[in-house]
Image: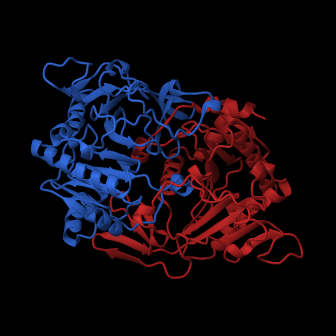
Chain colours: A red, B blue
Amino acid sequence: MREFRRDPVIGRWVIISSERSKRPSEFKISQHQTDDKDLCPFCWGNEKFTPPEIISYRRAGTQKDTAGWWVRVVPNKYPALRVEGEVVRTGEGIYDKMSGIGAHEVIIETEHHDKELYQLEDKYAIDIFRAYRDRIIDLKRDIRFEYILIFKNSGAIAGATLSHPHSQLIALPMVPIRIKQELQGAKLYFDYKERCVFCDIISYELSCMKRVIFENEDFVAICPYASRFPFEVWILPRRHDPMYEDIQENELKNFTQIMKVINKKICFSLSNPPYNYLLHTSPLKSYNLPHYHWHLEIMPKLTGVGGFEWGTGFYINCVPPEEAAKFLMEVQ
Amino acid sequence: MREFRRDPVIGRWVIISSERSKRPSEFKISQHQTDDKDLCPFCWGNEKFTPPEIISYRRAGTQKDTAGWWVRVVPNKYPALRVEGEVVRTGEGIYDKMSGIGAHEVIIETEHHDKELYQLEDKYAIDIFRAYRDRIIDLKRDIRFEYILIFKNSGAIAGATLSHPHSQLIALPMVPIRIKQELQGAKLYFDYKERCVFCDIISYELSCMKRVIFENEDFVAICPYASRFPFEVWILPRRHDPMYEDIQENELKNFTQIMKVINKKICFSLSNPPYNYLLHTSPLKSYNLPHYHWHLEIMPKLTGVGGFEWGTGFYINCVPPEEAAKFLMEVQ
């Protein structure tokens, strides 16, 4: 079974994917990752352990699904959704469900099993973010999809099951509730002020310089004013653009630079913490929204998250973002 | 510093509470709990290690802040909010903040350091849920408060820092965003159907009996149709009532019974997993909402939650609720 089900109260869609299921007795919170390089399906030489690659950035003359790549995109071997089929919405008694159609891909970020982003050369690292763009552009042609989520779980506590650096992509036939809320909030602000709230955040943060960690020609990295987590970081493009896939070549270069700088600061200062990041970009069927502005949110996982946070969307953060920004700014 | 800050995009309030702060180098994900009974501030004889009690249910003739109680409510020693002061809303540049006013209390559920709810005698256990009611009724008189959250974190992975059974209460000067969304969704349903969505869920679940785990005269326990987590359980009162604090004496008895039954089923079948629960009840200044229905949501923490879930409010659940309900129903 792979289907979307809608919560009848708040309208949140959940993927029920029982092909991933285990017997109840097998449930354990996994804190372990596969760390044997010979067994790692994301290392050179082990390409046969993944489904055939979708795209790769590789040395001239090397063959598809063999060593020689530096960024490789493959379908998830245990996908939460399946690509084939139609998006069918049906009722089930008082409830609503939808067929579990979508794409679930893995972006293997490097051939090096143990390297963090900041340890990669720019000329290779840039293709990670190029792959994000290229996959969005390709999947956008599939009219069944409404949204593409690109995210990274790094470390077992952040949800990664393999330690080899990788990010993930999920294409969905609906816009996730959290993104909808962000779009609604940004629209409300725009309707009142006739300005993009993200553009205003960037300009205010650059004027007061209390929460800016790093900036380059095209991007700004800040600890957001209402950070949910200690050392939460947002990276925003200076140029108003709702869609990540519009990123230009010079911006890709500067995005790679700021991502590497922030990654290094987080790894050095917080002892290689587990972390998640998520790309926030426009729904696929929207076009040039004046009120939305793509950005990337990074959440180091330093403290446990209890019932309070889960049930309410209400967070307690014990590190003021001004202190976090000052600390991260000073770390080399 | 203890203040509320509002996310300028989606309007989510966050508590920034730096008196709980540590140096960045001290951040570690804590998987440990204090388990030494001599040091446990929630055990009999250690009452001096907590702030003075607010209320307790105790043996006749025993003194306040000494042994002899079976349920004891105290202020949190490290509160995220402070009780004294006015609720002041101010701007900070383009942002909005509010003074960190609120109450943060701990409900110590039993004098027994190691007992789960199902191991307590009914006559003592009932006073845990009576304490929830009594604290809401008392705090409701404080017109600064808009909402009271009552929740439990059990196990380090679920966010508990002490293993002695306890739940927590936080009184807030605003309604949390997640509860607002639930109220809005329930209102939308009511406006269309002129029926309470929760009443409809109960009656549909009792008619198809696919996700019902247990029921008694006053309550029904189900695995919800769009469960976010494996073995998620909701407990709903059969009688439409938006406010937990309206609970009647016979209902308190039956609520205690169903809570104990579900607690035992979860502990037995899933090997004492970490879990959270959260009471969903009406905002304090609403009265007899026809569209809202108090309930309690229990979330065992069996699998890690990755970036996908965090950033999107979108969940992948690998155990269909029908299977979870069947399994929990059969466990004695």
Q: Residue A49 is drawn in which quadrant?
A: bottom right
At 70% from the left and 78% from the top, the residue drawn is: A52
Query: Left or right: where does residue A201 sit relative to residue B8?
Result: right
Q: Quadrant of the C terminus of chain B?
A: bottom left
At 61% from the left and 31% from the top, the residue drawn is: B26
Q: Give the x, y percent position of residue B314.
A: 48, 59
In this rendered view, identify the residue nearer to me: B279 or A78: A78
Q: Measured along the vertical axis of the image, is residue A204 above or below residue A175? A: above
Q: Is residue A231 visible?
A: yes
Q: Give the x, y percent position of residue B91.
A: 51, 29
Query: Left or right: where does residue A94 sit relative to residue A234?
Result: left
At 47% from the left and 45% from the top, the residue drawn is: B157
Q: Measured along the vertical axis of the image, is residue A219 above or below residue A43? A: above
Q: Residue B153 is drawn in which quadrant?
A: top left
Query: Left or right: where does residue A46 sit relative to residue B42?
Result: right
Q: Give the x, y percent position of residue B180.
A: 36, 47
Q: Residue B271 is drawn in which quadrant?
A: bottom left
- Which residue is farthest left? B250
In this rendered view, identify the residue nearer to me: A162 or A194: A162
- Which residue is farthest right? A61
Query: Left or right: where does residue A235 sit relative to residue A170?
Result: right
Q: Measured along the vertical axis of the image, is residue B116 above or below residue A328? A: below
In this rendered view, identify the residue nearer to me: B254 or A243: B254
Q: Measured along the vertical axis of the image, is residue A141 above or below residue B217? A: below
- Which residue is farthest bottom? A85
At 49% from the left and 69% from the top, the residue drawn is: A20
Q: Give the x, y percent position of residue A33.
A: 62, 56
